[in-house]
Image (spheres, rainbow, N blue to C red):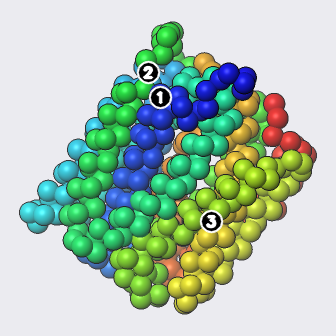
């Protein structure tokens, strides 16, 4: 950044971008807490919590590659606008159905699927939008600031969702809908790019170009796939309603605090990394961090004390942030602008949807062997993945610095 360049927080478009992402994240996370509690309150079956993840995952799996292609060919602001308006409509639908008592459980699953479809377009589009609204010299600062704000939103969202659900099951969906609408205004307020992406014919090769690009970069492939399998196996998020109600006896407010605990750890680690950035042996530090993620998951599985459970979730979030910083930095450094939509689409599919698929896996395993054993199994599997990936991707072990 040159001495006469404005600070990134003084750029109006970047502020609108931050507001849109933060509000959308708060709304999504708050509604996730409410949906999980609503489903489990109705059925008392952990398998149904896994179905919530599956119904979010399937549309993401089907639509993500098309979404990446569209993000590289159309005005990314308008795509984000449409997605957030659709998400607001879904929240209004659930709120109305719960209030009037006509919304069946299968109707909630349908609403979740529509929400997943909107997220399939919103996530890679917004990720690809950022480099186009800040000067290249300020991109790292913008990414760090955005990550910090998003992690803060991950703390606020679950807490708001849990508190509002304690006041009544309609409240969190109404508030989330309003937040999505305000987020849509902010994304439209972002300055229109001077030049829009060139439109090219949509072919099989162009749609899956992001996959080919990542495959050609062993370090990027190893980093993204490590996160994929770690989150797939180690995610205990889907079973938090079971822990809050049946194991920790914490209630919906306690569920909100359990959901926000990983984000607390993530924000704390973000502050540490901002003050003491990763300098050397970045690849090995990432592998160690994912291993700690698995170990914290195992301890959480067997904890019956809410303080210890929250602590383990904080550690889990902190260790996951190290992996997020490494992965996000490598994706930004190694990807040219005309490929960002498609590469971020693959990244979103690998990482974002692995949360939903991981929730489905956790629900299935919990239905077979119980929630405690299911979470412990995931933590053990995560540690095993670290050991396997350290052998499969020696280039990842040798990454020393976060540079191009």
Occupied quadrant, residue 334: top right
Secondary structure beneath label 1 = helix
The residue carrying pointer 1 sits among few (fewer than 14), some (14 to 19) or many (20 or more) residues within 10 Å by Cα, namely some
Name the mark nearer the viewer: 2 or 1. Answer: 1
Q: Earlier in the sequence, mark 2 or mark 3?
A: 2
* Rendered residue at 47%/88% (across/down): 247
Residue 27's tag is none
**How far apart are the two marked residues, 2 and 1, measured between alpha carbons?**
8 Å
Residue holding disc 1: 12
Q: Nearer the viewer, residue 153 or 259?
A: 153
Task: Tell me residue 339's x, y (percent).
Answer: 61, 23
User: Are discs 2 and 3 less than 8 Å apart at CB?
Assistant: no
Task: Tell me residue 223's x, y (percent).
Answer: 73, 46
Residue holding disc 2: 191
User: Going by the image, does 12 lie left or right of 291?
Assistant: left
Whether residue 124 is visible here, answered yes or no, is yes
The residue carrying pointer 2 sits among few (fewer than 14), some (14 to 19) or many (20 or more) residues within 10 Å by Cα, namely some
* Rendered residue at 67%/55% (across/down): 270
Task: Tell me residue 32's x, y (percent).
Answer: 38, 60
Residue holding disc 3: 265
Name the mark nearer the viewer: 2 or 3. Answer: 2
Q: Is residue 157 above or below residue 191?
A: below
Name the mark nearer the viewer: 3 or 1. Answer: 1
Occupied quadrant, residue 320: bottom right
**How far apart are the two marked residues, 3 and 1, measured between alpha carbons?**
30 Å
Q: Nearer the viewer, residue 172 or 267?
A: 267
Q: Is residue 268 above or below residue 184?
A: below
The residue carrying pointer 3 sits among few (fewer than 14), some (14 to 19) or many (20 or more) residues within 10 Å by Cα, namely many
Quadrant where the image shows the C terminus = top right
Q: Is residue 42 above or below residue 154?
A: below
């Amino acid at each position: 950044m040159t001495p006469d360049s404005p600070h990134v927080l003084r750029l109006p478009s970047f502020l609108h971008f931050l507001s849109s992402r933060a509000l959308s994240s708060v709304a999504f996370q708050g509604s996730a807490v409410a949906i999980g509690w609503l489903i489990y309150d109705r059925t008392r079956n952990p398998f149904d919590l896994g179905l919530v993840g599956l119904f979010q995952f399937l549309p993401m799996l089907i639509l993500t590659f098309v979404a990446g292609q569209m993000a590289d060919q159309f005005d990314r602001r308008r795509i984000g606008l449409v997605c957030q308006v659709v998400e607001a409509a879904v929240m209004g639908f659930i709120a109305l159905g719960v209030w009037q008592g006509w919304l069946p459980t299968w109707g909630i699953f349908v609403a979740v699927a529509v929400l997943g479809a909107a997220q399939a377009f919103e996530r890679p589009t917004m990720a690809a939008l950022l480099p186009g609204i800040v000067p290249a010299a300020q991109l790292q600062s913008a990414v760090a600031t955005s990550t910090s704000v998003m992690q803060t939103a991950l703390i606020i969202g679950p807490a708001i969702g849990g508190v509002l659900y304690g006041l009544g099951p309609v409240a969190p969906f109404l508030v989330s809908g309003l937040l999505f609408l305000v987020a849509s205004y902010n994304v439209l307020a972002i300055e229109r790019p001077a030049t829009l992406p060139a439109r090219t014919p949509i072919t099989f090769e162009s749609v899956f170009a992001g996959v080919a690009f990542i495959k050609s970069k062993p370090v990027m492939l190893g980093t993204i796939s490590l996160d994929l399998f770690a989150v797939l196996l180690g995610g205990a998020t889907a079973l938090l309603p079971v822990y809050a109600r049946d194991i920790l006896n914490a209630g919906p407010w306690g569920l909100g605090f359990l959901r926000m605990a990983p984000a607390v750890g993530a924000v704390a680690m973000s502050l540490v990394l901002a003050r003491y950035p990763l300098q050397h042996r970045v690849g090995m530090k990432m592998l160690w961090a994912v291993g700690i993620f698995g170990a914290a998951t195992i301890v959480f599985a067997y904890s019956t004390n809410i303080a210890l459970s929250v602590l383990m979730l904080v550690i889990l979030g902190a260790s996951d942030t190290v992996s997020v910083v490494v992965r996000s930095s490598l994706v930004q450094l190694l990807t040219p602008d005309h490929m960002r939509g498609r590469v971020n689409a693959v990244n979103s599919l690998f990482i974002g949807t692995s949360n939903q698929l991981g929730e489905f896996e956790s629900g299935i395993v919990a239905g077979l062997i119980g929630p405690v054993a299911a979470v412990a199994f995931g933590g053990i599997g995560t540690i095993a993945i670290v050991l396997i990936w350290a052998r499969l991707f020696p280039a990842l072990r040798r990454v020393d610095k976060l540079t191009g």
